[in-house]
Amino acid sequence: MTPVLLVGDYPPPMGGIAVHVRQLHDALVRRGARVRGIDLGRAAGVHPQVRRARPGPALLGALVEEKEAVTHLHTSGNNPRSLAVVAGVGLLRSGKGPSVVTLHSGLLPAFLAHSKARRIAARAALAPYARIIAVSEAVAAALHAAGVDGSRIRVHPAFVASEVRPAALDPALDSALTDRLAARRPLVAYAHHPSKVYGRALFLEALARVRARRPGLTAVIYGPGTDAPEFAADVRAAGVAGALEVVGELEHPVALGVMAACDLFVRPTLADGDAISVREALALGVRCVASDASARPSGVTCFETGSVSSLARAIDAALEAPAASDAGPDAADFLLQQYAQAWAGHRPGILHHERFLKGGTQ
């Protein structure tokens, strides 16, 4: 089987891209693939086949040193730094096998729509890649509009169904906490991130409104940044301190265990690609409420992005509805096919400049 070099953030922290890269790494290994990784973040030493090389000289050296393989980069694509990494990885690995890139961010369409220069830069950066994986139709449409060669674009969610493996909460969490969770209902799970895009203030205000009608409602909040002053200020402003169980950043299997123990998962994001956590909730049979910032899978209760009242109504409605269940797609199987096709069509030493030129100057 063709060796694979995964390049992207590995956890910690437990961000969406990092979780997907780690799960994909493990899923490919379970399928018999030879996988090595380059971590662009700060998770040094967490995996025996992963080396840390943040963007800069260390990354350049690592890309040159790594042996022939299908290179698969994972990045947001929604800022100049990300595009620079896309360009660098594609060019430096072009002589050592075909390259694949997954673009994850729901902010990418707005980023590319901002200017002609950004669209030209994206097209140039993506020129060396045999496959470009868009996590949603919206991301794919933005790439088409930028003049990227459509024959290389594939749409597939960044979700590995076979890796949804929740851990038991006891003994993973403090026993007093697990006892409190068992005694409080309904429980609402919320995956926190300090970025405003994740809609923290919106969620807390909606929680206060719903709790006025459901006094026992409790939100279990996990993720990075819950110890920041801004988090505490938003909790005070919403007046919901007594309605929260804040558990901080968790290993992903434990976070899945928390989600599985709850009655509802809420994702109030202001922008989104294809949210792994939404698909995880469905795979676990947990009710899910999410903003309509992007297309959502069947079974999700959607609310109007940015609207507190719409979110509060959606939480109420979802708690009264039966839970939907959907195992979801598995990116590992899909990507193994893409790797094989890319390898079969690889022409060593060719940088494929025509992929840039054929797109025109949009």
Image: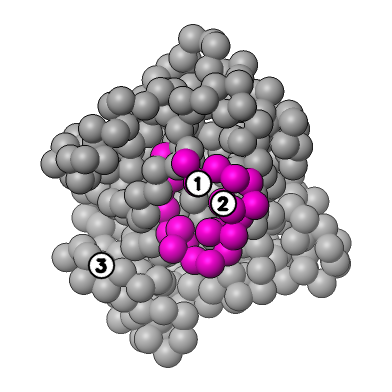
Above or below — where is 52 with respect to 47? below
**Res 77 → quadrant:** bottom right
Above or below — where is 25 with respect to 215? below
* Alpha carbon separation for disc pair 1 and 2: 6 Å
> How many circles with numbers are drawn on the protein?
3
- Is residue 306 visible to the viewer in this orientation of the structure? yes
What secondary structure is marked by label 3?
Answer: strand
Label annotation for residue 50 = 3
Is 272 included in the stretch rendered in magenta? no
The amino acid marked with disc number 2 is Val
Q: Are marks 1 and 2 in contact (CB under 8 Å)?
A: yes
Instruction: Name the mark nearer the viewer: 2 or 3.
Output: 2
Label annotation for residue 235 = 2
Q: Write the residue at 42% across / 39% down.
A: 220
State which quarter of the image contains the C terminus.
bottom right
What secondary structure is marked by label 1?
Answer: helix
Instruction: Please tell me how crowded label 3 is: few (under 14), some (14-19), or many (20+) other residues with Cα within 10 Å.
Output: many
Instruction: Name the mark nearer the viewer: 1 or 3.
Output: 1
Q: Write the residue at 75% across / 61% down.
A: 111
Measured as percent of width and height from the top left, residue 74 is found at: 47, 59
Pointer 1 residue: 241
Measured as percent of width and height from the top left, residue 299 is found at: 55, 18
Measured as percent of width and height from the top left, residue 29 is found at: 21, 48
Is 234 included in the stretch rendered in magenta? yes
Residue closest to the far bottom:
57
